[in-house]
Amino acid sequence: MTMKTVVSIIPLLAVSVSLLAGLGIFLLRKYPNWREGCSILAALVKFGLVMSLFPLIRDGYIIECPIVTFPAGILPNLGFALRVDTLGFLFAVVASFLWILTTLYSIGYMRSLEEHAQTRYYVCFALALTGALGVAFSANLLTLFLFYELITVSTYLLVVHEETKEAFSAGTKYLTYLMGTGKLFFLPAIVFTYGLAGTLQFKPGGVFLGVDPVWAGLLLVLFVAGVAKTGIMPFHNWLPSAMVAPTPVSALLHAVAVVKAGVFTIVRIVVSIYGVGFLSNIGIGIYMAIAASITVVGASVIALRQDNLKMRLAYSTISQLSYVILGVMLLTPDGVKGSILQIVAHAFGKITLFFCAGAIYVGIHKKYISEMAGIGKVMPWTMGAFTIGALSMIGVPPLAGFSVKWRLLLGAMEAHQILIVAVLLGSTLLNAAYFLPVLKKAYFEEYAGDSHHQHEAPLIMRVALVSTAIITVLVGLFSDSIVSLLGEIS
């Protein structure tokens, strides 16, 4: 099928909106209502610009936006450019829409707890979303790396937001893992790719045709090791440590800007640098799938032992994100589509859970699961949304998580990998083992807290978490429509 392309400035505008919003938020720092209004307006405009691309994406077009092209005599086939295809569009829709809800949630959270440095907080959020959209719309590895590093720098300031010794320690680990692996593995992999393929452009079917499979396989190892944002073991320790940040930051890290950018990058590299067909021929995919399986199971086992709710959710994220890598490395149609669907499903399900964790802290000042007896009766809206998010993570139909796991199971059977089928089924039991006790304590034990704190979080926070819970249901119900948009991936 001939690829249809169209040149448009809209991708650049969509990326730039949050960058300009960061400046506006800073200039309005003395006027909190205007500052937060600027953030909400920018989020709405960003989402609107992204959605304006839908008619072209639906009709099979690729939207291109060249920015800077290096002289052909010096660095041929190299430059900075944006490019929107179905994969990037899906990630951009999720990221831009969740910025709206996270901003609303943040207003309630930050004001309820009277947090300091709120202007810096909102500016860094805007910069992180600039990076996330830039990653989604990158036309090549060089552009992607630039935006990938912007995410790291901007979210570092969010991780250390509390400015405590613990926060700065977590921030140091955060930078060490994310920037360290980027410089040691990711950047060299990009350089070697340019040397071998003569281009860094993302193309359907990849750019490695004719390249020695041994070199290509070694480069894939470098790429996976270099994208520490995926949280795959042993490059995962930064993620639990980062939970020292405010809960909306944790939600951003896990659902939108950081870990999603990581797994999206891996999917993009597999699909648009290697090509599914090329990787199938060199036979390295299954080894990567097995490595991801170790993280799926290992992180779930660690989650079982966590009493701090955010820490349990953090290890759950490490496990659940490896489903994305596992699925795409199966290199089967259902495996790859299940992997991409997991980016969407996990975003809404996990942000719901983190929103709920923050609402519980604001409402009754509890962080530990052992202290949450009976809160289902005290905070019915919050725990109702938490229940939907948890059941989706487990894979209960008809929620989004079930649709993902069903496609991953089909993908594993297409690849004739019974071991991966066993991992998927076993991890589902582990998911249930660390989420169901939370629900049991919330609904089937008596509340023993202070009667003066028996209330829900502010309405604006509840609107955000209920909205993401509803969308988690809708993603499950309409998963086939999302998958059909992807078309054939080679």
Image: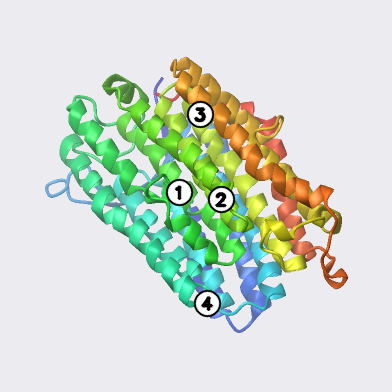
Q: Nearer the viewer, mark 3 or mark 2?
A: 3
Q: Nearer the viewer, mark 4 or mark 1?
A: 1
Q: Secondary structure at mark 1?
A: helix
Can you give x and y, in whole percent of width and height, for residue 312 in the image? 59, 52
Which amino acid is tagged 3? Val
Q: Residues within 10 Å of mark 2 (few under 14, many from 20)?
A: many
According to the image, label 2 marks what residue?
A: 255
Can you give x and y, in whole percent of width and height, for residue 376 in the image? 82, 53
Mark sitting earlier along the chain (2/1): 2
According to the image, label 1 marks what residue?
A: 261
Label 4 vs label 1: CA separation? 25 Å
Q: In the rendered view, tell whether residue 338 sits above or below residue 363.
A: above
Q: In the rendered view, tell whether residue 483 sits above or below residue 198.
A: above
Q: What residue sits 51% from the left and 23% below the top?
A: 421
Q: What residue sits 48% from the left and 61% below the top?
A: 241
Does 239 sit left or right of 462 as displayed? Answer: left
Q: Which mark is residue 26?
A: 4
Mark sitting earlier along the chain (4/3): 4
Q: Which mark is residue 168?
A: none
According to the image, label 3 marks what residue?
A: 423
Mark sitting earlier along the chain (3/2): 2
Q: Is residue 364 visible?
A: yes
